């Protein structure tokens, strides 16, 4: 599931950001249904991968490693110390960014464009985190 989510996010990212996402493009969302669908797919896939990794896979992996899963920020801090993610601070930024992309969707084209461009810049962070978590699972032989 994680691999598929990564593939789908990367594919959507490539299609949406073939050119920079500007406030002008954000203003086109009401009149360009294809663009609106790509934005919706990107935001959904970005959030879904982040949720899958941070809220589902990470707590299970930490428990399997003998750690006691706790609040999300504590799990992220442990994951950083274990080298499973690069930065818990970046991860918290990703959570805020996801919320901004969703809530600013209708409100302000400049804020939406900025949030989407920033999200585009963080896609690699999510994919690398997924690769690290999956590599740990595979290294330990826990994947069927």
Image (tube, rainbow, N blue to C red):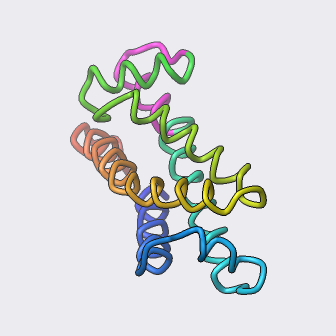
Nearest to the observer: residue 86 or residue 1: 86
Residue depicted at 71% across the width and 52% down the height: 104
Q: Is 66 displayed left or right of 21 in the figure? A: left
Residue depicted at 39% across the width and 19% down the height: 77
Residue 92 position, x and y percent, is: 49, 31
Give the vertical position of 43 relative to 58 (above or below).
below
Q: Is 33 displayed left or right of 121 in the figure? A: right
Residue 32 position, x and y percent, is: 71, 86
Give the vertical position of 52 relative to 72 (above or below).
below
Nearest to the observer: residue 44 or residue 83: 44
Residue 131 position, x and y percent, is: 30, 50
Magenta segment: 57-70
Give the vertical position of 15 relative to 120 (above or below).
below
Nearest to the observer: residue 122 or residue 126: 122
Residue 106 position, x and y percent, is: 77, 60
Number of marks: 0
Residue depicted at 40% across the width and 15% down the height: 67
Q: Is 36 displayed left or right of 53 in the figure? A: right
User: Quadrant of residue 38 in the image?
Assistant: bottom right
Residue depicted at 65% across the width and 44% down the height: 99
In magenta segment, residue 59? yes
Q: Is 76 displayed left or right of 38 in the figure? A: left
User: Quadrant of residue 13 in the image?
Assistant: bottom left
């Amino acid at each position: 599931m994680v691999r598929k989510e990564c593939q789908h996010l990367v594919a959507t990212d490539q299609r949406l950001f073939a050119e920079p996402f500007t406030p002008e493009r954000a203003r086109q969302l009401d009149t360009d249904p294809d663009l609106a669908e790509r934005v919706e797919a990107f935001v959904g896939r970005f959030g879904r991968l982040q949720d899958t990794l941070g809220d589902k896979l990470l707590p299970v992996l930490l428990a399997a490693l003998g750690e006691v899963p706790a609040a999300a920020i504590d799990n992220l801090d442990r994951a950083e110390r274990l080298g499973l993610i690069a930065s818990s601070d970046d991860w918290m930024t990703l959570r805020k960014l996801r919320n901004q992309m969703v809530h600013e969707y209708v409100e302000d084209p400049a804020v939406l464009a900025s949030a989407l461009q920033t999200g585009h810049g963080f896609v690699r962070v999510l994919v690398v985190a997924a690769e690290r978590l999956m590599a740990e699972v595979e290294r330990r032989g826990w994947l069927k």
